[in-house]
Image (cartoon, grey):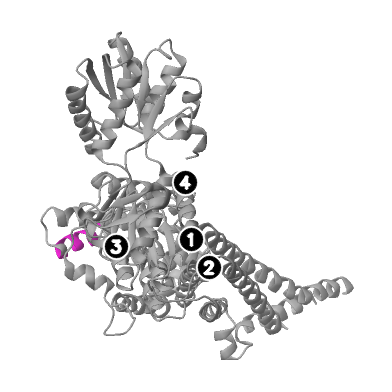
């Protein structure tokens, strides 16, 4: 009796994921809830906040969130494996300073930028090495390198700023396509987005990332190169952070040691808001993009509404907590919902 | 059943978030309602102050001054700003103000270059830009309200110390770090001023506390032992003067060795009240904000364009003239003493 009911439950579980039509499986997800929320917030803001409906908002908004968007891509992958990288903002600062110092030292800007990218890769490799080869937890490692890289950045330049960059590049960082309000850098992001979407959702490497997040041991036994995958991801995060650092430097025309301080928290907040589980194994890129945009749209609209920065922080923070809580709450609901299947089973077994 | 609950869950999440958004917007109708309608016309007296960061007593004081000024000419005062003093956060706010179409932005720059492009975009949109306290490159703003010149800072400190020691005897300087550009410029000007006008006052030593509280404290102690005839100490740095005052207040030299320099009222209050320090100097941030507000008004109304020689009326502070590079000088540094220190909180 017990055996048959368990078997029935097991069968029910195997087709649980497919017991809904395709449109429901695509639309009734956490990711889509965030996408919908972005749309709702944008529409409400456009209707109620004066100045938000202008086309220029799009430009400023995209330029503002661009570093977060860029870094969120590798961060998503890292967090799906169950790891975290807190040092990204410090790598942004370091690459910004390196670009500045080398340009000021007489190197052409292009060369300086390449050196900064390589330095970003090295920083990522240091993280990767400590996490995968030495086997330390990424939280501890990247808190350390957060301080280390930031210290290097501030130490290299002190409290001064380097502000002399080629006009061509600085204007390119802010340029818009033709007469439209779409910044040119958006296309750099779109290319990277395509690469990361294919990488995460359509390659064995990407499936391996989910497998690692769900169970490292199971992934290893299934032939996933756990260490190598993580190492590659940390290096990727380093390079993309360096790229974001170069963009940051050009957009503000200023290389400073304290550039992008605290950016890692915004990135991680957006990634978590976008539906990536902090325990790994769960998440999708479209949700993360929506998460970044949600934070961006919210803060832009609130700023326009003259809401002070501390209130903006409170709202974003509350939203973040709420998003984490709802996930757990929904999971708990789902578990409870399974209970009716379980309760009779207990009754049945006692009756039997 | 499963589907229905998921949908219900999603709905709950949506409603909750929408509620959040709506409360956010409710705040808007309260505080944002003061903005005048779009366009930066000549009568758009909506002036927004953008300090380096919010929650900073120094800027709270300057904004209070600005608010008072804007109240006098019936403009609209607003203050926005980041929680942390970073240039990138300021750029977002400048962009926002451009979108809102305010009349003028008065900003204390976190970086002379980083916020330049954003400011120029604002100016292209017809917004007047005034910097105060901390300047940007001259080509990114219409006016800079300078709190004090190096000459003024040097002179007020020499005046105060010589007055306190009776214009004769040995004095020493407790500076920040040995290669701090502004400190060294002030010290050179102080030496010149002493030589020219105070022949009986002898500067016997210059020591460096590196703007570190403990180092400055120890250097003060060493200074007093090395020079037993010392009559006064000048510390042109807020860290140094506070540390020196702390040493003096607990030592036998209290009331015997004079101390002056640049400090903030909140740091120095207890030493002024217990008699360790007679007076010290700094500028008055409230006046700085007040002047920045009137300068913004003059720009908005087209009375001045920021050219050299332009002059404008600044309420209780009187008339001001624009100097080289679009700089308006607030005036001589402000001297704080037991009489007036109670009026300040920064």
Mark 1 vs mark 3, foreground winner is 3
Neighbourhood count class around disc 1 (C-alpha, 10 Å): few under 14, some 14–19, many 20 upward: many
Q: Position of residue B34 (x, y in %)?
A: 53, 68
First along the sequence among labels 1 and 3:
1
Check disc 2 and report the residue beneath it: B34
The chain under label 3 reads B
Q: CA distance from mark 4 to mark 1?
A: 14 Å
**Dot 4 falls on which chain?**
B
| Residue occupied by mark 1 | B78
Work out whether disc 3 and disc 4 sit on a shared chain. yes
The image shows residue A243 at horizontal and vertical percentages of: 28, 65
Residue, x 17% and y 67% (percent of image)? A167
Mark positioned earlier in the residue sequence (1 or 2): 2
- Residue beneath disc 3: B304
**Pointer 3 local density, CA inside 10 Å: few below 14, some 14–19, many at least 20:** many
| Residue at mark 4 to residue at mark 2: CA–CA distance | 22 Å
Report whether mark 1 lies on the same chain as mark 3. Answer: yes
The residue at 26%/76% (across/down) is A175
Q: Magenta part of the protein: which range?
A: A110-119
Towards the viewer: B223 or B284: B284
Check whether the beta carbons of the residues at disc 2 and disc 3 lie within 8 A of each other: no
């Amino acid at each position: 009796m017990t055996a048959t009911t368990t078997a029935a439950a097991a069968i029910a579980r195997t087709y649980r994921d497919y017991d809904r039509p395709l449109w429901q499986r695509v639309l009734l997800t956490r990711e889509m809830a965030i996408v919908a929320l972005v749309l709702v917030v944008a529409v409400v803001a456009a209707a109620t906040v004066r100045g938000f409906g202008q086309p220029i908002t799009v430009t400023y908004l995209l330029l503002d969130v661009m570093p977060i968007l860029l870094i969120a891509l590798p961060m998503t992958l890292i967090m799906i494996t169950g790891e975290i990288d807190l040092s990204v903002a410090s790598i942004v600062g370091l690459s910004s300073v390196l670009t500045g110092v080398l340009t000021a030292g007489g190197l052409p800007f292009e060369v300086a930028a390449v050196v900064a990218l390589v330095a970003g890769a090295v920083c990522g490799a240091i993280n990767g090495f400590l996490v995968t080869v030495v086997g330390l937890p990424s939280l501890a490692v990247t808190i350390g390198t957060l301080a280390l890289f930031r210290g290097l950045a501030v130490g290299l330049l002190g409290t001064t700023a380097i502000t002399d960059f080629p006009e061509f590049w600085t204007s390119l960082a802010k340029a818009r396509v033709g007469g439209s309000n779409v910044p040119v850098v958006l296309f750099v992001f779109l290319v990277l987005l395509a690469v990361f979407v294919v990488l995460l959702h359509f390659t064995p490497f990407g499936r391996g990332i989910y497998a690692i997040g769900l169970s490292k041991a199971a992934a290893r036994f299934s032939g996933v190169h756990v260490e190598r995958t993580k190492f590659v991801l940390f290096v990727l995060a380093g390079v993309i952070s360096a790229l974001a650092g170069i963009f940051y430097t050009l957009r503000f025309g200023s290389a400073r040691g304290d550039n992008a301080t605290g950016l890692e928290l915004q990135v991680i907040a957006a990634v978590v808001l976008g539906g990536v589980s902090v325990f790994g194994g769960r998440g999708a890129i479209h949700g993360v993009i929506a998460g970044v945009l949600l934070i961006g749209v919210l803060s832009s609209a609130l700023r326009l509404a003259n809401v002070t920065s501390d209130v903006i922080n409170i709202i974003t923070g509350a939203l973040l907590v709420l998003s984490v809580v709802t996930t757990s709450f929904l999971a708990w609901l789902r578990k409870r919902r399974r209970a009716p299947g379980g309760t009779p089973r207990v009754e049945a077994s006692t009756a039997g | 059943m499963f589907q229905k609950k998921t949908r219900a869950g999603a709905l709950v999440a949506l409603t909750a978030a929408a509620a959040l958004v709506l409360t956010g917007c409710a705040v808007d109708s309260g505080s944002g309602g003061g903005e005048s309608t779009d366009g930066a016309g000549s009568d758009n007296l909506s002036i927004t102050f953008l300090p380096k960061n919010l929650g900073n007593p120094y800027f709270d004081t300057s904004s209070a001054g600005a608010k008072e000024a804007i109240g006098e000419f019936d403009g609209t005062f607003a203050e926005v700003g980041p929680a942390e003093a970073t240039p990138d956060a300021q750029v977002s706010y400048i962009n926002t103000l451009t979108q809102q179409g305010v009349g003028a932005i008065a900003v204390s720059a976190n970086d002379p270059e980083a916020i330049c492009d954003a400011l120029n975009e604002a100016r292209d949109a017809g917004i007047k830009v005034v910097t105060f306290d901390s300047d940007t490159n001259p080509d990114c703003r219409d006016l800079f309200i300078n709190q004090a010149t190096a000459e003024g800072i040097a002179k007020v400190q020499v005046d105060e110390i010589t007055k306190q020691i009776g214009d004769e005897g040995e004095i020493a300087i407790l500076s920040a770090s040995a290669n701090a550009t502004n400190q060294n410029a002030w010290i050179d000007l102080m030496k010149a001023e002493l030589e020219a006008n105070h022949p009986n006052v002898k500067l016997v030593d210059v020591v460096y506390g590196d703007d570190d509280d403990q180092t400055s404290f120890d250097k003060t102690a060493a200074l007093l032992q090395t020079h037993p005839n010392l009559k006064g100490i000048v510390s042109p740095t807020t860290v140094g003067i506070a540390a020196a005052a702390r040493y003096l207040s607990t030592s036998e030299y209290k009331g015997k060795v004079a101390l002056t320099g640049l400090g903030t009222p909140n740091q120095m209050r207890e030493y002024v009240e217990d008699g360790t320090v007679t007076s010290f100097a700094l500028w008055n941030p409230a006046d700085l904000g007040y002047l920045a507000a009137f300068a913004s008004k003059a720009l908005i109304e087209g009375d001045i364009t920021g050219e050299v020689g332009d002059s404008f009326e600044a309420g209780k502070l009187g008339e001001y003239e624009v100097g080289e590079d679009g700089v308006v000088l607030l005036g001589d540094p402000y001297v704080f003493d037991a009489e007036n220190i109670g009026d300040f909180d920064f």
